[in-house]
Amino acid sequence: MLLYRTLAASCVVVAALAVAPDASAQTTADLFDRNTLQEIRLWVNSRELQQLRSNYQLNTYYVADFQWRNIRVRNVAIRSRGSASRNPNKPGLRVDFNRYTTGQQFLGLKSLVLDNIWQDGSFVAESTAMAFFERMGQAAPRESFCRLYINNVYHGVYAIVESVDADFVARTIGEKNGYLFSYQYNSQFHGEYLGDDYQPYKEKFEPQTHELEADTILYSPIRDLFKEVNGPDDAVWRDRVEQYLDVNRLVTYVAIETFLAENDGVLGASGMNNFYLYRPADSTKHRLFPWDKDNSFINPLFELMTRVDENVMFRRLMTYPDLRGLYFQVLDACARSAAEESWMETEITRAAALVADAVREDTLKQFSSEAFDEAVGLLQAFARTRSDFVLRELDRVR
């Protein structure tokens, strides 16, 4: 292992020089081009690849070489990733370019995710959901599709997903040095106050930046957010909460999830899930970034107030007429935007056609090729009917 890493590390500069003239013409826009089915190749020591498969529930890193087009990056780190999607046959992977070689990047990226698309029979639900967040003016990770080869063996269709990290924050909202946390699902959580101790918040919010700072700096604003959310129902409740939460952004975010019939988001069936929490360096006010949307589109008749009353934070925000009005306003905008020139159905059809042949050749996928066709058809039906249903419901409830 040590010899392998040493040799790989010694080749980094040589490899960089070899690809530099052509690599300069490639950008992340090319990598995340939604109209191109990319090809990515990984080379991993066969023994370590077997260890990754055998220990797929662990986050152990292994050394690999990574290639996209004519760019080969040596001595990268890969590990198994995912929650319910983890499996030994078609592993979801996180790729860290700088773990073994300080400062090494790929197209300016320090890391990316190779999503095995294990739970989505259509293969295109999450990419469509993220594209829709972006269409609605929200910051969302970029995604594209690839054929993944490991040691020259085809492992099927994967999504290339932009990591939500400090560079993502800088790209999408132009901020640097803020505090970013990945929400970790470990038990049902509906926005309750978890007490004064930091530990329950540390277990749910994993820092992605400022990891070495003291708990009091990292977690006091998060603890205080949920303390105020669960505070007395009085005339200054909203003023107190707005010190720690951008309420307009949260209402907008949840409205988009609701339009997408998201079953595993902020108002998820098992509590809050699948988001990043962020606050600027000079503020205590938090906002959310979306993550992992393969449980969207579950039903075109998904009700507009589904599980609103289960979440302490959102239930109380909906008692304010202006915020309730904003929620309905965003749902209205979502319905019209999705239906405009059949945008959503067109996006689903385009993405499915792009990956269809590669999906049929994917022998490691969980579902059959017939199930893929059926799932795509259900998404297309969702896109054709969801907007009309939402607009009818808005006429009824407003």
Image (spheres, rainbow, N blue to C red):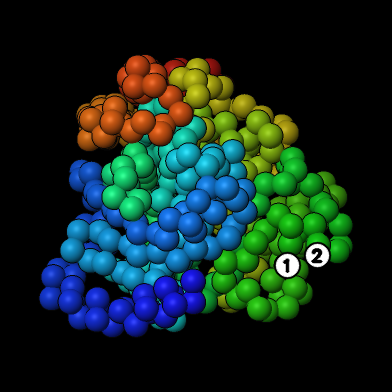
Tell me where residue 264 sits by quadrant.
Answer: top right
Residue pictured at 41% horizontal, 51% vertical: 114
Coordinates of residue 345 in the picture (x, y in percent) = 29, 26
Disc 1 on helix, strand or loop? helix
Q: Residues within 10 Å of mark 2 (few under 14, many from 20)?
A: some
Q: Which mark is residue 219?
A: 1
Tell me the amino acid under the disc marked 2: Tyr
66 or 269: nearer the viewer: 66
Labels 2 and 1: the sequence-earlier one: 2
Residue occupying image coordinates x 79% and y 47%: 192
| Rendering coords of residue 24 (x, y %) | 17, 73
Q: Quadrant of residue 197?
A: bottom right
Looking at the image, can residue 278 be seen?
no
Depicted 367 relative to depicted 111: above or below: above
For disc 2, the marked residue is: 198
Left or right of 148 on screen, residue 255: right
Tell me: residue 108, above or below residue 377. below
Q: Position of residue 321 (x, y in %)?
A: 62, 38
The correct choice, above or below, for 342 with respect to 312 in the image is above
Camera-side residue: 366 or 180? 366
Labels 2 and 1 touching (C-beta < 8 A) = yes
Disc 1 marks which amino acid?
A: Tyr
- Quarter placement of the C terminus: top right
| Apparent side of residue 299 relative to residue 356 in the rendered image (left or right) | right
Residue 385 drawn at (x, y percent):
38, 17
Q: Residue at x 49, y 77 (%)?
A: 2
Residue lying at 58% horizontally and 60% vertically, measured from the top left: 60
Q: CA distance from mark 2 to mark 1?
A: 6 Å
Q: Would you say residue 365 is visible in this rendering?
A: yes
| Left or right of residue 216: residue 372 | left
Secondary structure of the residue carrying numbered label 2: loop
